[in-house]
Image: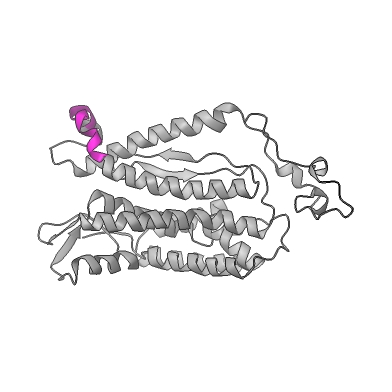
């Protein structure tokens, strides 16, 4: 893996034919400086050891977070809980397994489509987080060369959200069947917003719920909720988020207009809803609002990918919650 290099010359691999086939990887068709954007071949530590270490640490922090969520014993915080009741750590496995299952599926959706389109990419790099909430900040994959064309960009970008969404739906159905409906008396603190899909499945499973009652989510359902939240965030059509990839593949330079339309919406939602949207609006400036071009922008997507793009839009609508967190 240390010797991996992006192919620049395929002339030796072509069959000896009278008429040469058109090679979509022919570097002569690309801009003269495209090779300068290829990252150097990484070492074994960054290719293999670092992803494994980060994943193991994230397994621990999500187990810790899940166990701390269901803990009913008096403690003074997650660190005190860990030191006093380390034997209870594995009580967090329903939450940890579900959340990591969603995130792993999401990231490997990107990874395998990158392999299919011959775009060198790292293994998923998971980011451990504090156990006070969910124990992770998600995961990323690093692309080590430019993406060839709009088809590759679309496939790589859309594969993660769709794959993760499917797992989250299954987890939500299982988690809701294990959840309970209780009176709102005595319920206080941080509350979760309800995306459309959660509202629908809750109605299917529990029927109409009176205003004086609420659902206490099982850890599996709680992890599924975060799966929807992460999916919606990633599908924002901004910069190099998954939604930015999909929007640029579908609309080209018009993705810029779409991104600048989303920005004020986030600001409004941040002022009158969840303040965290203001943070996301600020992050869009840091990561870049517009999407960089692909090497071959003229490649046609085809009708099937356009329909998948509409599917991704539907997933965003079903997963998005204007006010994901509030106190009540």
Does the rendering let one see residue 289?
A: no
Q: Vertically, is 279 above or below 70? A: below
Q: Is 90 one of the magenta-colored residues?
A: yes
- Specify the quadrant of the image occupied by residue 238: bottom right
Q: Is 96 one of the magenta-colored residues?
A: no
Of residues 259 and 96, which is closer to you in this image? 96
* Residue 199 left/right relative to 267: left
Kindly identify the residue that appears in the image at 30 percent across and 57 percent down. 172
Residue 201 screen position, x and y as percent: 28, 66
Kindly identify the residue that appears in the image at 74 percent across and 41 percent down. 7
- Where the N terminus falls, by quadrant? top right
Instruction: State the extent of the magenta-drawn residues as a range.
Output: 82-92
Does the rendering let one see residue 49?
A: yes
Residue 265 screen position, x and y as percent: 46, 68
Residue 109 screen position, x and y as percent: 51, 50
- Specify the quadrant of the image occupied by residue 54: top left
* Residue 207 left/right relative to 62: left
Residue 326 screen position, x and y as percent: 28, 59
Q: Vertically, is 157 above or below 72? A: below
Q: Vertically, is 155 above or below 206? A: above
Kindly identify the residue that appears in the image at 22 percent across and 27 percent down. 83
For the stretch drawn in magenta, what is the main secondary structure?
Answer: helix
Of residues 265 and 55, which is closer to you in this image? 55
Kindly identify the residue that appears in the image at 24 percent across and 65 percent down. 202
């Amino acid at each position: 893996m240390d010797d991996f290099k992006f192919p620049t010359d395929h002339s030796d691999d072509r069959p000896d034919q009278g008429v040469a086939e058109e090679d979509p990887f022919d570097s002569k068709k690309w801009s003269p400086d495209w090779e300068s954007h290829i990252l150097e071949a990484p070492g074994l530590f960054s290719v293999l050891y670092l992803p494994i270490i980060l994943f193991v640490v994230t397994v621990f922090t999500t187990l810790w977070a899940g166990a701390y969520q269901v803990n009913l014993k008096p403690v003074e915080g997650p660190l005190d809980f860990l030191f006093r009741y380390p034997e209870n750590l594995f009580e967090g496995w329903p939450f940890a397994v579900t959340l990591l299952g969603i995130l792993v599926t999401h990231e490997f959706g990107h990874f395998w489509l990158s392999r299919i389109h011959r775009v060198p990419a790292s293994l998923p790099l998971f980011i451990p987080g504090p156990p006070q909430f969910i124990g992770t900040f998600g995961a990323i994959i690093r692309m080590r060369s430019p993406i060839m064309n709009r088809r590759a960009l679309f496939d790589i970008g859309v594969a993660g959200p769709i794959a993760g969404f499917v797992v989250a739906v299954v987890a939500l159905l299982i988690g809701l069947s294990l959840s309970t409906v209780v009176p709102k008396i005595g319920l206080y603190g941080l509350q979760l917003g309800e995306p459309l899909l959660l509202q629908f499945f809750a109605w299917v499973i529990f029927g109409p719920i009176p205003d004086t009652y609420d659902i206490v989510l099982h850890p599996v359902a709680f992890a599924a909720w975060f799966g929807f939240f992460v999916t919606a965030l990633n599908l924002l059509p901004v910069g190099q988020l998954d939604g930015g990839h999909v929007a640029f593949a579908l609309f080209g330079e018009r993705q810029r207009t779409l991104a600048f339309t989303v920005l004020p919406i986030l600001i409004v939602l941040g002022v009158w809803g969840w303040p965290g949207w203001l943070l996301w609006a600020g992050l869009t400036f840091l990561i870049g609002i517009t999407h960089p071009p692909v090497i071959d922008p003229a490649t046609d997507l085809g009708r099937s990918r356009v329909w998948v793009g509409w599917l991704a839009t539907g997933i965003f609508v079903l997963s998005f919650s204007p006010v994901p967190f509030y106190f009540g």
